[in-house]
């Protein structure tokens, strides 16, 4: 059996099956997991280092351990023996025809390395390493990737200093197709949906009936694009676009709860006539109108007043 907390949990689970007398719970099956059982499985390490156990290991200690336990497959320098995975090198290859994804060239967080080695390596004997050994070998693999110096010692504190070169290339995908309005009513016949292929992916469009009054706001829809580009947006409106997508489109995209639909000039002309000051005040502080309730900041109190005003500018300029 492995030398790990997990083996304890496995043994307990096994005993439960073997002796029905232990079985409890409302349905007569299973039993409530104890904190000890949960701890046995709760071994993940987060990007900020949460979950790392006490202990430490140096690059120097890691060298011998790596050579004894890892090099036979991953190569003395992480170059990979035969067809076993490569752990080092590959910098600058990601945007080429033959990207080489390694710990150094690709992985965004060092926590994954610690976790992976602790959880799954060495391949023939996973979870056989002590925490100090995992620290040392992790430090050594980082060293093989030129991410730390040869005198580096890895522990909970020094983990915070490790910066993976490719981390900036991992970011939240805020492209518009992820905020496509879902059709929950007035939906078009599914057989008429169009699938529009763009360089950014495949996006189904035309979910709503043509006469539904719902603005054609779907990504890749040529009519909508033509509408949207009819007026050049001000800087404030450009800044407000992503805020709108995040916090306002949920109601104003499809007219949920009486919200005036963005892009529907008729629904907006009288509102716009009130002037921006009133519109901003209503959007920031919320108000009750004859169509329904506009919650303050769309219910997203984390937004700054200026962000809300920018979103209003985007809505107004898109609805003239
Ligand atoms: C018997 C061969 C073998 C040994 C020994 C071995 N590994 Fe692995 N290692 C593998 C294989 C196979 C994979 C890929 C596993 C998979 O994709 O499911 C892997 C994957 C990895 C990865 C992830 C690579 C990636 O880019 O996805 C790391 C990191 C790693 N090993 C580190 C280690 C370390 C550190 C040791 C020594 C403690 C070790 N390995 C020992 C075979 C081995
Ligand atoms: C939960 C649904 C909902 C969300 C989310 C929402 N709104 Fe509204 N909004 C409404 C409704 C309903 C109205 C119409 C109220 C009325 O006039 O009866 C409205 C009206 C407005 C008006 C017109 C004000 C006027 O005086 O005519 C503006 C401007 C506005 N919203 C901005 C925003 C902005 C900016 C956001 C995002 C930060 C947002 N809304 C998010 C429901 C919402």
Image (tube, rainbow, N blue to C red):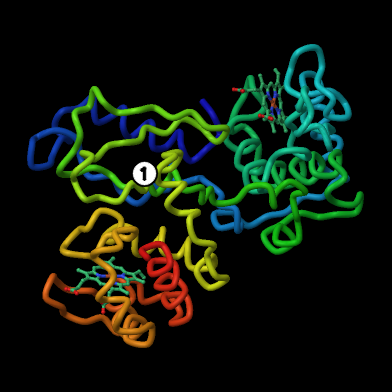
Name the residue located 77 percent from the left edge and 48 percent from the top edge. 165
x and y, in percent, of residue 276 in the image: 38, 82
**Residue matched to label 1:** 37
Q: Which residue is nearer to you in this view: 91 or 136?
A: 91
Name the residue located 20 percent from the left edge and 34 percent from the top edge. 188
How many C-alpha atoms fall within 10 Å of the one at disc 1: few (<14), some, or many (≥20)?
A: some
* Residue closest to the far right: 150
Name the residue located 82 percent from the left edge and 16 percent from the top edge. 81
Q: Is residue 195 above or below residue 297?
A: above
Q: Quadrant of ligand 2?
A: bottom left
Q: Which residue is nearer to you in this view: 259 or 216?
A: 216
x and y, in percent, of residue 295 in the image: 24, 75
Observer able to see residue 28: yes
Q: Is residue 282 above or below residue 246?
A: below
Q: Is residue 282 above or below residue 312?
A: below
Image quarter in which the C terminus is found: bottom left
257 left or right, relative to 48: left
x and y, in percent, of residue 277 in the image: 37, 87
x and y, in percent, of residue 15 in the image: 28, 29
């Amino acid at each position: 059996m492995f030398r790990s907390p997990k083996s304890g949990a496995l043994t307990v689970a096994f005993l439960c099956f073997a002796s029905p007398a232990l079985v409890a719970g409302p349905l007569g099956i299973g039993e409530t997991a104890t904190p000890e059982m949960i701890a046995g499985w709760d071994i993940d390490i987060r990007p900020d280092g949460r979950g790392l156990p006490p202990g430490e290991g140096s690059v120097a200690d890691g060298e011998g351990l790596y050579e004894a336990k890892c090099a036979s497959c991953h190569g003395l320098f992480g170059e990979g023996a035969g067809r076993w995975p490569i752990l080092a090198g590959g910098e600058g290859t990601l945007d080429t025809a033959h990207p080489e994804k390694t710990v150094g060239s690709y992985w965004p967080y060092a926590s994954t390395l610690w976790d992976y080695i602790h959880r799954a390596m060495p391949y023939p004997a996973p979870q056989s390493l002590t925490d100090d050994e995992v620290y040392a070998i992790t430090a050594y693999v980082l060293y093989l990737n030129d991410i730390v110096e040869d005198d580096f010692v890895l522990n909970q504190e020094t983990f915070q200093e490790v910066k993976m070169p490719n981390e900036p290339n991992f970011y939240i995908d805020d492209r518009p197709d992820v905020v496509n309005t879902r059709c929950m009513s007035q939906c078009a016949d599914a057989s008429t949906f169009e699938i529009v292929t763009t360089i950014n992916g495949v996006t189904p469009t035309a979910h709503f009936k043509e006469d539904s009054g719902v603005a054609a706001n779907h990504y890749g829809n040529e009519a909508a694009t033509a509408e949207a580009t009819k007026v050049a947006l001000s800087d404030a409106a450009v800044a407000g676009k992503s805020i709108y997508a995040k916090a306002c489109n949920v109601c104003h995209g499809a007219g949920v709860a009486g919200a005036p639909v963005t892009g529907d000039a008729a629904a907006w002309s009288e509102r716009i006539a009130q002037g921006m000051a009133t519109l901003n005040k209503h959007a920031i502080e919320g108000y009750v109108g004859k169509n329904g309730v506009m919650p303050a900041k769309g219910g997203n109190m984390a937004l700054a007043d200026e962000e809300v005003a920018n979103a209003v500018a985007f809505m107004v300029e898109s609805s003239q």
